[in-house]
Amino acid sequence: QAFLQHLLPAELPFFFLTAASSMQLVCRGVGRALPAQAFMLRMEHMRCSPALCAYLPVRLRTDLEGRAAACASEQSSSYCDSSPSDSEPSAGKLEETWRVAFKASGCREFQQRLEAADEESCVVLANTLRGHICDAVKSPHANFVVQKCIEVLRPVAFQFIIDELMGDSLGCMAEHRFGCRVVMRLLELSLPHQVRQVVGDLMPSISKLARHRYGNYVVQSMISNSATEQRCLILEIFRREIAMMCQDHFGSSVVRTVLQSGNDSDRVPLAQAISKSSGLVRQLMHSQRGQAIVKLVVGLIEVPERRRLLDEVVKTSGLPASKYGRIFRLHVEQKASSQLLVATVHAGA
């Protein structure tokens, strides 16, 4: 109550009193008030602005300046004690360093150390995670530390991360909410033989992984970063299971990504497999993701096959009643009219 009484003296302007009342802050000692600590933080933010600070009472301004100086001194001393430039940390400290990565504040400190340290010190810090990689990858905080290790270390230095994840753990991590991020960093930043090792370990479950909520992102990264022979094997599996892939919510995302950004040698065979699959196009026309795939397929296949496919789509029963079917039919009619116009212009010329 005393704190609230000296927070709201007569010097405060009317607009500040209005803001305080809107935050349900009631002076005169009412118990249902905003916590004093939160309000003090708001005052500290005001102190940083000279224009706002001028409205604060002199007593409160002095208290805030003293508190800010004390906090700055404490942070400075803490940083000096834990500076990355400290030479030769004790073995006991190194053994406990990995625990810091599992905390919200500690993982940020760990990443800052990795960014500021030289190559040798980075290796020493990263090695403290040996034996704990699987737990770190599944942690909402430590997974960022593992990603940072992959980013700042040489590929040879983070080989131990791959070694600990190989086997059954790698497939589980690729389907994990946080683990999929680490696997994607490995695919993006590893050497070719390391990428081949990771992709080869995930290949037996590629179809299941592509239809997983998080695993589909890993599969997209595999297609982008794997060697040619491994990418061809992946796409061959997709062509054999194209109906199941296109009708799945997450599998269709992988197919659409290949059709949009892959090489022609990858896109055209996949588009042909979709167009030749019996009844698949008619089923895809009734969903948003499906009609987006059909649009891409129409642009990739040859003209005779395209005409056959469009005739099949236009004659699909229930197409006018489907929202996305009507959108696709309008798209086809506009494209046909524009091609007819071009043909007429060429004939006239």
Image (cartoon, helix red, strand yellow):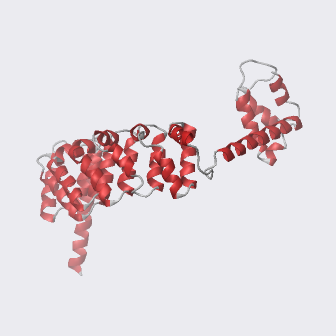
Indicate whether 260 appears above or below 20. below
x%, y% of residue 11?
88, 35
- On the rendered structure, is 283 left or right of 209? left
Q: Residue at x 40, y 46 (%)?
A: 181
What x and y, as percent, mark residue 167?
Answer: 28, 42
**Would residue 75 appear left or right of 150 to someone viewing this image?**
right
Give percent across and percent down for residue 250: 29, 43
- Residue at horizontal 53%, vertical 51%? 114
Screen quadrant of the N terminus:
top right
Report the side of 143 relative to 80 (left or right).
Answer: left
Question: How far across and down, in percent of the image, does residue 316 sit?
Answer: 16, 46
Left or right, 41 with respect to 11, comes to: left
Number of marks drawn: 0
For residue 337, which quarter of the picture? bottom left
Q: Is residue 260 visible?
A: yes
Say if residue 224 shows up in the picture: no
Name the residue: 22% across, 79% down: 348
Q: Quadrant of the C terminus?
A: bottom left
Residues 230 and 87: in front is: 87
Camera-side residue of 251 and 124: 124
Q: Nearer the viewer, residue 254 or 115?
A: 115
